[in-house]
Image (tube, rainbow, N blue to C red):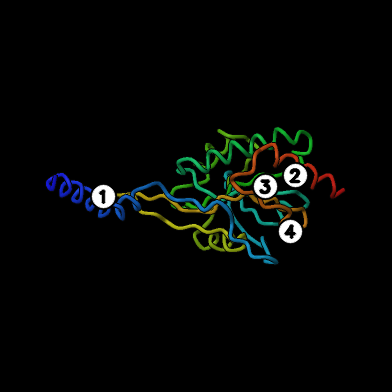
């Protein structure tokens, strides 16, 4: 009996000792929503490179509604799931989708070149435009949108922790709505359609 208890105790201790290592090796943890304080200004001036190699800024999309998501192409699940979600929303909006420009802003400039972004976003929906930039440019736009991101080492490579919210920005550059990962495509379509319709 004592031998059994000793074996169980050793196993439990080994499992507890392995937790810190397991935590680092587990895929990146993704915050569900952006930490946006009440009354905080979201958005602002930026300059990035699109998937075709063109430099774009906030004026490039003047007069358009923007559906903005931050992520990276090697994201295991949250990013592809969200882009599928965005494609469904665009399809659900029908003609109203012509007034919406979806943006996928990569937080991984080391690996997400314009060429990589082009093939990645095309897979989900050709209307989704991929953007990248220098680390300083991406930090600026991430800070402007209250987006958290951080590298998580995984052996000889890395993943990214990052905010998983989707932003609806109005033609005036102001935040119109913030959608969490739990918001269904149907709910997003209803909200976006109502917001765009009310703006006329």
Furthest-right residue in this view: 200
Q: Residue at x 18, y 50 (%)?
A: 10
Quadrant into which the N terminus falls:
top left
Label 3 close to label 1 by CB (< 8 Å): no
Task: Give x and y (percent) for residue 165.
Answer: 60, 50
Q: Pointer 3 and pointer 2: residues touching (CB < 8 Å)?
A: yes
Label 4 crowding class (10 Å Cα cut-off): few <14, some 14-19, many 20+? some
What numbered label is drawn on residue 174? Answer: 4
Answer whether labels 3 and 4 touch (C-beta < 8 Å): no
141 horizontally vs 98: left or right = left
| Dot in front, 1 or 4 | 1
Q: Which residue corresponds to the image point at 59% horizontal and 36% vertical from the top-left?
A: 84
Q: Earlier along the polypeptide chain: callout 2 or callout 4? A: 4
Label ID, residue 15:
1
Front of the two marks 3 and 1: 1
Q: CA distance from mark 2 to mark 4?
A: 14 Å
Which residue is the extreme one toward the left?
3
Q: Position of residue 20 (x, y in %)?
A: 31, 55
Q: Secondary structure at mark 4?
A: loop
Q: Which mark is residue 76?
A: none
Mark 1, secondary structure of its residue: helix
Local crowd size for mark 2, using a 10 Å CA cut-off: few (<14), some (14–19), many (≥20)? many
Mark 3 packing: few (<14 Cα in 10 Å), some, or many (20+)?
A: many
Q: CA distance from mark 3 to mark 4?
A: 12 Å
Earlier residue among tags 1 and 4: 1
Q: Nearer the viewer, mark 2 or mark 4?
A: 2
Q: Are marks 2 and 4 in contact (CB under 8 Å)?
A: no
Residue on which disc 2 sits: 192
Q: CA distance from mark 3 to mark 1?
A: 43 Å
Q: Which residue is mark 3?
A: 67
């Amino acid at each position: 009996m004592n031998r059994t208890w000793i074996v169980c105790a050793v196993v439990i201790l080994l499992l507890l000792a392995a937790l810190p290592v397991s935590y680092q090796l587990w895929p990146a943890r993704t915050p569900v929503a952006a930490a946006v304080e009440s009354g905080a200004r979201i958005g602002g001036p930026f300059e990035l490179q699109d998937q075709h190699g063109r430099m774009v800024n906030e004026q490039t999309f003047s007069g358009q509604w923007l559906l903005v998501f931050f992520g990276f192409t090697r994201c295991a699940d949250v990013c592809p799931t969200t882009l599928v979600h965005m494609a469904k929303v665009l399809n659900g909006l029908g003609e109203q989708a012509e007034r919406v420009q979806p943006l996928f802003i990569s937080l991984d400039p080391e690996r997400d070149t314009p060429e990589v972004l082009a093939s990645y976003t095309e897979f989900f929906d050709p209307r989704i435009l991929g953007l990248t930039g220098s680390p300083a440019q991406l930090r600026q736009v991430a800070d402007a949108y209250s987006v958290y991101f951080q590298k998580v080492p995984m052996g000889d490579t890395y993943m990214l922790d990052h905010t998983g919210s989707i932003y609806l920005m109005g033609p005036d550059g102001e935040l119109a709505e913030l959608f969490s990962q739990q918001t269904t495509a149907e709910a997003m379509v209803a909200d976006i359609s109502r917001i765009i319709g009310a703006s006329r």
